[in-house]
Amino acid sequence: MSLETKSLHGKRILLIISGGIAAYKSLDLIRRLKERGAEVRPVMTAAAQHFITPLAVGALSASHVYTELFSREDEQDVGHIRLARECDLIVVAPATADLMAKMANGLADDLASTVLLAADRPVLIAPAMNPKMWAHPATKRNVATLKADGLTFIGPMAGEMAEKGESGLGRMAEPLEIVAAIEALLTPAEKPLSGKTAIVTSGPTHEPIDPVRYIANRSSGRQGHAIASALARLGAEVTLVSGPVTLADPHGVKTIHVETAEEMRQAVLATFPADLAVMVAAVADWRVATASEHKIKKQPGDAAPTLQMVENPDILKEVGHHPERPSLVVGFAAETRNVEENGKTKLARKGADLIVANDVSPATGIMGGTQNSVSLIFADRVEHWPDMTKDQVAEKLALRMAEMFLAKT
Ligand code: C5P
């Protein structure tokens, strides 16, 4: 294990595991935290013990596992107040809708909720629940209350649920994403972009054909959203202009939601001036010249309609040539062939300082997926990065952008 990965050396984490199927991922989370040198003290709710056993949690954490509020032994040994205080961070993973409801209302009827009420340490919450529960107004109110109380959230993420056939926002963040959020909270990063502003575009655009139909693409917004978060962690004041995605708005970022390329352009220009701009969105190149006001009806015997298309504004090109051009302009190039060659042409045409090119051929699974494999195309050279997650690309790219920006200004 290299020193770099001992990033949490000596940090004490109180891990509260509540009762959801995602609890199995908490076992891996414990491993990952231990690998990085953290001490993990686990608390399990009664419901959590239906999903994973205290034996497994104890073995992986090499710690006593706390489960009871009224345990004479535990109270003599540590006690719930000490549990709440003798740590650098409290992590609730998975956090069920029920536990969050208790926290938002200050209930304390078991060890986990009592510790959370007694806590004076930072708290990181990794929610996991059915998408309907996450979307419920009661949960939304509780999340808003907890955020206003200063608690930090990681996730939930979009994807398949344990319940057959269900998908949506509700999956617990993956253990490594939780680790990254813990590191961000516990190892105060340098903030080289403090006081600087950044605009990020992300996701696809939807171009209407008629009131019910639209043209879209497979972009998930994962890469753009991750870049917005990473720039915010470096201290930038970030405005994220997002097309329609199923991702949660990133923490610490101002998110503006748009549908079409024209709306995205307006939102980007309304945010000007800015110090940095990263255009990650997969903007539709064309839109239907005149979207039909009414649903286009299929009549028996009629020929299929022909869509007259017109070109959309090229936001990156406009930003790259704007009189108030940000000092650093970065574009993306999703290509299925001649990635480098097309990237070079794009760099010049769009007036960007850097083009991040990726091969989005279906075989790569990059479009809509969580991994990315990118090449950085500068005017005078090309840099290939190994395969990594979109979060890792975001982290590295944000650091590189900060360096480039500081070198220029
Ligand atoms: O020309 P192409 O679409 O391949 O260029 C991709 C880059 O340009 C991306 O950074 C994308 O966000 C941006 N772009 C844009 N507006 C468009 C088309 C692309 O900002 N209409």
Image (cartoon, grey):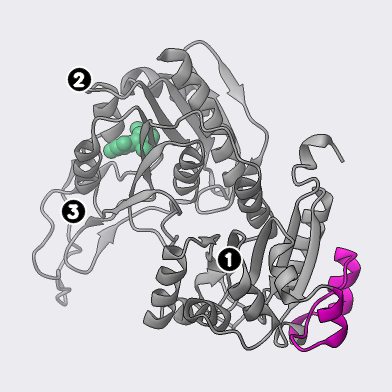
Q: Hey, what amino acid is under mark 1?
A: Ile
Which of pointers 2 and 3 indicates the residue nearer the eye? 2
Is-magenta flag for residue 394? no
Q: Which residue is mark 2?
A: 323
The structure residue drawn at horizontal position 49% and vertical position 26%, both measured from the top left corner, is 402
The structure residue drawn at horizontal position 83% and vertical position 50%, both measured from the top left corner, is 35
Q: Residue furthest top?
A: 380
Q: Which residues are magenta?
A: 51-77
Query: Which of disc 1 and disc 3 is earlier in sequence?
Result: 1
Q: Residue furthest front?
A: 76
The structure residue drawn at horizontal position 56% and vertical position 28%, both measured from the top left corner, is 375
Q: Hey, what amino acid is under mark 3?
A: Leu
Label disc, if present, on residue 307 of the rendered structure: 3
> Label 1's element?
strand
Q: Position of residue 168 (x, y in %)?
A: 48, 71
Q: Which residue is mark 1?
A: 125
